[in-house]
Image (tube, grey):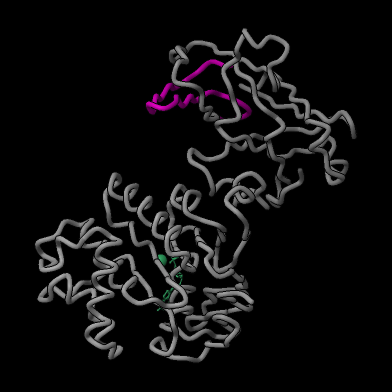
Amino acid sequence: MSALEIDNVCKDFGTTRVLEEVSLAIDSGEFLILVGPSGCGKSTLMNAIAGLEPVTSGRILVGGEDITWRTPAERDIAMVFQSYALYPSMSVRGNIAFGLEMRKVPKAEREAAVERVADLLQISHLLERKPAQLSGGQRQRVAMGRALAREPQIYLFDEPLSNLDAKLRVEMRTEIKKLHQRLGTTIVYVTHDQIEAMTLADSIAVMREGRILQLGTPDEVYNNPVDKYVAGFMGSPSMNFIDATLQGQAGDYRLHVITDGEEELVLPWPAERETPALAEHVGGTLTLGVRPEHFAEEDARLGDRAEGTLLSARVSVVEPTGADILLQLPLGDGEVTARVGPDCRVRPGERLDLRVDMRRGVLFAADSDTRLA
Ligand SMILES: Nc1ncnc2c1ncn2[C@@H]1O[C@H](COP(=O)(O)OP(=O)(O)O)[C@@H](O)[C@H]1O
Ligand SMILES: [Mg+2]
């Protein structure tokens, strides 16, 4: 039995369909991340789970029980929003205990819950302060504490970190991961930050225009995307998309890429990555997807053992990030991004030999963006 099941949920606002036959199920203790561009329906889905928005059709089940038509108070679910409002006149203690008080939890139990979450979130020393006396990160912890004070069946987090600065976000991300590991709670978490998605999730649902395009583990959505949209959405910098013509036949497929309108690069497609769908596209144009990290600076020391196809390109931009270096270089009819090691000494305008690992490449139909191989 699933901890949470969304069964064919549709949601209309007036004549606009915002959720289109959304179905998913998660197990108890699972951390599900919803990602997708702004306006794709993430918050609407969360509000439907919480009971803040009625669905137009479909069902929502918690622990096997149909809760579709229950009020928010009748659902055993706690939610943390992007813009969390703390009560300014109440202390941190009062803010954390407030929801319990509303639910008529006895005082001794309330106090024990406050101590427990304060300890967990390391805000025990702040309990008597007012929200105005807290930093942004501390306020965020209090908002989280308010949800954690209860022990509901499911927690919903809707972009809880998006108002924090970059450093704090990363710290809080780790805190949330630790919390989940420690408490083993079932969580549905919305973010548009795909690093947050990759690092926190047991499973990721990639949404677009009210639909779930792919539901899978972080590894599956990153390495085995169902289509070009998911491939481009997950990963930063994004996957490179290169127009290529498919030539050859089964056992010997090659991708021809024209660079600068003249030079032709031939990339053999690994036999183990062939699919029957390729046969129908010989002579046609496909989109080759290559992630930045699947380029590598040619290493002469590896000699014949080096993996991948060698190419040479004039580097146009060099962007050191500290841990590695991002290079922009012309390939196909545009520029691609390659991620190389921090010791690469190439300068803008110089030529560089790179290998591209085609075993990690993906192929999409140029017209429909569906995955071919
Ligand atoms: N109360 C509402 N009335 C009408 N349209 C809404 C309402 N809430 C959201 N929408 C629309 O539904 C779509 C999805 O919104 P939302 O779920 O907030 O997206 P996300 O959280 O993914 O950014 C958007 O086009 C938005 O304008
Ligand atoms: Mg939203």
Above or below: residue 1 compared with residue 297: below
Quarter-of-image position of residue 244: top right
Looking at the image, which residue is at 44% across and 24% down?
A: 325
User: Does residue 315 appear left or right of residue 116 in this picture?
Assistant: right
- Which quadrant, please, contains the N terminus? bottom right
Between 225 and 76, the one lying in front of the other is: 76
| Residue range (magenta) | 313-334
Looking at the image, which residue is at 54% across and 47% down?
A: 234
- Verify whether residue 212 appears in magenta: no
Q: Quadrant of ligand 1?
A: bottom left
User: Does residue 184 appear left or right of residue 286 in this picture?
Assistant: left
Quarter-of-image position of residue 27: bottom right
Residue 79 in percent (x, y) is at 37, 73
Above or below: residue 166 compared with residue 84: above
Residue 124 in percent (x, y) is at 19, 62
Between 280 and 150, the one lying in front of the other is: 150
Between 104 and 283, the one lying in front of the other is: 104
Magenta stretch prevailing secondary structure = strand
Quarter-of-image position of residue 83: bottom left
- Verify whether residue 329 appears in magenta: yes
